[in-house]
Amino acid sequence: MEYTSKGVGNAALTTGIIGTALGAMASAGGLAGILGINPQKPADPGDKPVTRYEMGLIQQINERDNTITLLTANQYSDNKADALQAQINQQAVWTAGATATMGFMNQQIQALYGITKLMIPENAIAIPAVPSVSGTSTTTATNG
C-alpha cells in the first residue's frame, strides 16, 4: 500500500479549508458582507431620520389626501344616486301614463260592449258534459 506524503495531504487539506472559507465569504457578500456593509445597495442620500415636525407635516398631507379621496368618492356616489333617482322618476311617469291609458281603454270597452267585470266568473262559463265512452277497442301494431 502506498501512502501520500504528509506534505501533500496537508496541502490538500489546506486548499479545501481555504476554498470553503472563500465560498462562505462570497455567499455572505465578501469581506464587506462579513463586516456588515452591504455593497449591493449603496446608501441613499435621502435616507435620513425625520424630525417630529416633518412627520407631523407628512401626517397632515396624508389626512388631506384621505379627505380629498373620500369627498371624490362621495361625489361619485351622489352622482350615481341622482342618475338612478332620475330613472326611477321616469319609470314612475311612464307607469302612470300606462295606468291612465289602461283605465281609459277599460272605460271604452265597458261603454262599447257592456262588460263590467275584468274577469269572467266561473259560473258564467258553460262546460259541456263529457260523453261517456262505451265499449273498449284495442288495436295491435305490427312491426314490419
Image (tube, grey):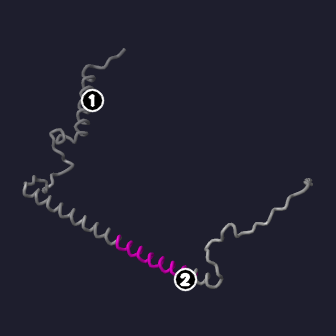
Give the spatial CA distance, label 1 vs label 2. 106 Å
**Observer-nearest of 59 and 4:** 59
Q: Amino acid at mark 2?
A: Phe
Q: Position of residue 109 (x, y in %)?
A: 62, 82
Q: Secondary structure at mark 1?
A: helix
| Residue occupied by mark 1 | 16
Q: Position of residue 68 (x, y in %)?
A: 22, 66
- For the point 39% across and 72% down, the residue is 84
Q: Secondary structure at mark 2?
A: helix
In the image, 61: left or right of 15?
Answer: left
**Observer-nearest of 114 and 50:** 114
Q: Amino acid at mark 1?
A: Gly
Q: Position of residue 71 (x, y in %)?
A: 24, 67
Pick out the residue farthest to the front: 123
Q: Which residues are magenta?
A: 81-105
**Observer-nearest of 42 and 56:** 56
Q: Quadrant of the N terminus?
A: top left
- For the point 63% across and 71% down, the residue is 119
Q: Position of residue 57 (x, y in %)?
A: 11, 60
- For the point 25% across and 64% down, the residue is 70
* Magenta stretch, overall SS: helix
Pick out the residue farthest to the top: 1
In the image, 121: left or right of 93?
Answer: right
Choose top left, top right, bottom left or bottom right for residue 61: bottom left
**Observer-nearest of 100 and 60:** 100
| Residue occupied by mark 2 | 104
Ranked by sequence position, the earlier of labels 1 and 2 is 1
